[in-house]
Structure formats: C-alpha cells, structure tokens
Image (tube, coloured by chain):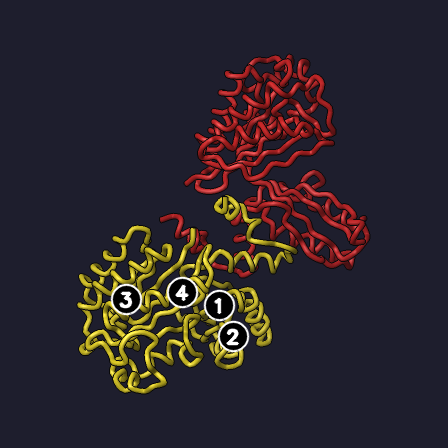
Chain colours: A red, B yellow
Amino acid sequence: MAIIECIPNISEGRRAEIIADVADAVRAVTGVRLLDLQSDPSHNRSVLTFAGEAGPLRQAVLELFDHALPSIDLRSHKGEHPRLGAIDVVPFVPIEGVTMAECVALAKEVAAAVAERFEVPVFLYEEASSHPSRRNLEDIRRGEFEGLPAKLADPAWRPDYGPARPHPTAGATVIGARMPLIAYNINLATNRVDVAKKIAAGIRMSSGGFRFVKAMGLTLDERDIVQVSMNLTNYEKTPIFRVFETVKREAARYGVQVLESEIVGLIPANALLEAAAYYLQLEGFSGEQVLENKLRAL
Amino acid sequence: MAIIECIPNISEGRRAEIIADVADAVRAVTGVRLLDLQSDPSHNRSVLTFAGEAGPLRQAVLELFDHALPSIDLRSHKGEHPRLGAIDVVPFVPIEGVTMAECVALAKEVAAAVAERFEVPVFLYEEASSHPSRRNLEDIRRGEFEGLPAKLADPAWRPDYGPARPHPTAGATVIGARMPLIAYNINLATNRVDVAKKIAAGIRMSSGGFRFVKAMGLTLDERDIVQVSMNLTNYEKTPIFRVFETVKREAARYGVQVLESEIVGLIPANALLEAAAYYLQLEGFSGEQVLENKLRAL
C-alpha cells in the first residue's frame, strides 16, 4: 500500500469551531487518517497532517477547501506568520511504497482541481515547481496576500493553474511535493550561545553548509545550555548522521561536547536505519532485510 | 495487528515432494504467510519461516504435524544435524504488537494440542521452559532420538506435555518462545585468524562475554580476511551496537581495523533503530516517533 502524507497550512488558528469543522471534513474521507492538528493563535494558523493513498488525499484536500474557504477572509486576517492564501500551502510527501514523481503528479492534479472548482490561483512549489525561481516557498510567498494583485499582474508570476488574479477572500494557494522534513536539535554541554550560532552557520546551506539543512543557534535558558536547532529538508541527500558528526566535530573545535540530540515530532524509519547502517559499517544492507518490511511486502 | 513468527525445523531435507507438501499445508492456512523455506540435504533438515497472528499460527503448526509426521520416520533418518523428533523444534518469536508472554502462552497451547492429537511428548524450551535445566535446546536434545526411551524414563526428563515415552517414528518435539535471532558478522582488515578467534572468545557468553552472544572466529579464504561470526540471541538485552563497539575496541588492541559488518538474513527494525538512537545520542526517543509506526498504530 502506498502512503503519502499531506500537511496543509490554513490561515486560521484562533476560531476553534472553524478549525474543528475543517478537521472533521478531512477525517470523514474514507482512506484518510488525520495524524495531527496544531493551531497557533499568535500565528493565526493551523497545520493539519494526514495520510493515505492518492485518491483519498485528493478528495480530502478538496473537502478542506470546501470547508475552509468560505470561513476565512484574508482581507481581515492578522497573524505573525506570512501567508498568501486562506489555504496557504499544501505539500504532499512520499512516505512508503510511492515515488516522488507520483507525489508531483498528485500535486498537479489537485492544483488543477482546486483552481477549476474554487477559482483560486495556484503556484506549484518544491519538487512540483515549474521553474527554479518557484521552488522555494519563501520566494512565492514574498509580498503576501496584500501584494498578490501586483505579483499576479507580473508575467513572471503567472500562476501555474487558475486565474491571474487573486481570489477576493482566499488569495492564492501553493501546492507541491517535497521530502519529509525532520526537525532535529543537538544540545551542547555549554552555555556559550556563540558556539551554537557559529556551528549553525557552518552547517546550514544559506551560509555555505549542507544543501538540505536549515539551522540556528539558541539558548535553552531553563537548562543553561545551548542548542543547534535544525530542519533537515532531505534526509536522503543530507543524512542525519553526517549532520550529527559534523556538529560534534565543530563543537570539539571549541572544546564543547555534544550532550544529546532529539527528534521533534516524527521521523521516517529510513532516516534512522541509514544512520544505523553508517555507524555499524553495514555492508550491502538493504531495507528488505528489515523483518517488518519483508512481512508487509508479502 | 499482532505479528508472531514461527520457525519449525523438521527432520527432512532430501525428499522434495514431502517438503513441498508440508510447505503447501502451511501456506494454505488463511492468515499465515510463508516467508522462507530452506532445506539442507546433508543435515537432512528443513527450516520453515512463517508469520501471522496466534490463531492462524496454531492451526498452521497442527497442519504441519499432520503432513510431516506420517512421512518422516526417525528410526531410519540420517543427517549431520542433531535431532530429537520428526518435527524437531518449533519456536514462536514476538515481532510486532505482541508480548513475549503471549508467545509463551501460544507455545503452551500448541504444545498441549500437539501432545493430545498426535501422542508426541513435548518439551517446552527457552522463554516457555518450565525449569532452568530445560531452557537450552542443546540440553533437551542431548542423546537425540536414539536416547529418548532412556531420557523419558528419567523423572527429571518427564515431558511437559504428552506421554513419557517416545512416539515410535516421530520421537519428541521441543516447542517454545524466544527472541528473534540476529545473524551478524564483523569482518576485520587482517588475515590473522587468531585475532578473530580471540575477539570471538572475548565477546561470547560461553567464555565470559555478553549474555546473548554466540561467536566464532573464522577465515574468509577468498578475500584473505577474517570474520567474527555471531548469533545475537536477544538484541534487547545485548544490543548490536554494544557488540560492534566492543569488537572494534578489541580489534584495535591488535592494531586491526573493522572493515565492515553484515546482517545475514532478516533483522527486526527495532534492533537498528536502537543503534541509531545510541550513536546519535537521541534523548527521549521512542518508536512512536517513527512515522511508519504512527501511521500503522492509527
């Protein structure tokens, strides 16, 4: 069975009845499992995580639009988090028995259906993007809802699907496919935040580090230690063990030891199996040797 | 869904039609998946590996007796491998969503049914054993089929189920529950077999090493290197990473490096997840953080 994850971000994090209605609409779709729902009132934004096969997911996203779109008006929406639309961003993530190409195809199919049914302009992003300039969510979202009329009037920002004008209340939506994201922190046995910041700068892509690492250094006041806080955006190409070993080595440069690391939320099994294979120097190891995988494959 | 593995060893490794008939009988049970079948003509023995929930497994083992017992006569059986019975040993192994206690209960239930239906004396072993002296298969099997009349006449070797006399053609059967076994080898960058043998002696229980390690040192002639070849009989209590790190450290004592390690056959995912957690110094990690587990639990 193929498992794809879908993690829509909607621009409503305060009105509980609307959030519950949207979650119920997703939950009601046969073949879809709602895994998580997190609402942030100061961001005025909610993140739904659900999973299933392509068909049910497509239906769930359309149900989500059907319920969220009439209730959210971006003309009066305020929140700390940047946003372009009422349904702001909809990523599809391959988890098991499914390729990235299939998730890209699903993203395009859903984008076309959303544009047609709701007259919302849609930009494709990440692996589904139509051009490198549209790959990063931050670039697409720059200018936010308020800047959409001008942005869509620019031929360079013609949407991938739907009209070249914002939906009056729902703006635009960004839909795409990406690898699972791992939220990963490494705690250092020191209270020197400069060390955490220097290490973060060294490993993140934006300042010359690994291609698929976002990182910052911060203080954990209550414990009097510091943390390198990271998002690993493609664990296949920038694996967790390489990041961990690099942080450890860089910390040693300042006479600092790694205290511990932590996974925040969920992690794909393969990210950890690859780490085990690396450290145990496993030769010729394949996922087919994992007993549970073998059982499920039959 | 609970997954239990069952790995019966039968005393027939030469007559293909009998082996095929037994495998077909197991395969025909709804809810049972035959994962593997290996026959060794010189041992004159076959090993079936199948999995499922308790009910279907119970039925599959009874079918296996039904088909194997009339076809195998230990009075004329010859082979290199020690054996006590036509159906020699039947271990149940907890894989997922099931406790060892449940596998012990299943072993006892199957043992009682086998004894009653086929009049075969049954010894319980490993986690299901009724006494420490019956824990190890080797102790129960000592004397083999030929020594059974004398053994069963000894009050200390009264069977756990069934008559205190051998089945005329099928001898006795050993049934029990145990942890999954990991076949694990570490190759060393040297051709000095004395180094592999010394390390093996240092890590195996029988000569003072880890409780759940069996190990020997041998030469891989074709590659001009040596290997520490191991069975890890309880990866929860003697984890793979501790064995690997100990071998590495012991090898360094002789100026020898670890070339690589290898898993032979299948390994439970948790054995590798624990290794990843160890090396990455993961704090507060639990299997519930593995995305695939979370999806399946819902």
Say few, some or many: other residues with alpha carbon within 10 Å of mark 1 (under 14 / 14 to 19 / 20 or more): some
**CA separation, marks 2 and 3?**
28 Å
What percent of the width, then of the height, locates residue A289?
43, 55
Contact? badges 1 and 2 (CB < 8 Å): yes
> Above or below — where is A278 with respect to A140?
below
Residue, disc 1: B234
The disc labelled 3 sits on which kind of residue?
Ser
The disc labelled 4 sits on which kind of residue?
Ala
Say few, some or many: other residues with alpha carbon within 10 Å of mark 4 (under 14 / 14 to 19 / 20 or more): some
Query: Which badge, 1 or 2, comes first in the chain's sequence?
Result: 2
* Local secondary structure at mark 2: loop
Residue B120: quadrant of the picture: bottom left
Query: Which badge, 2 or 4, comes first in the chain's sequence?
Result: 4
**CA separation, marks 2 and 4?**
25 Å
Give the camera-side residue of B1 and B74. B1
Contact? badges 2 and 4 (CB < 8 Å): no
| Foreground disc of the pair 3, 1 | 1
The numbered disc on residue B211 is 2
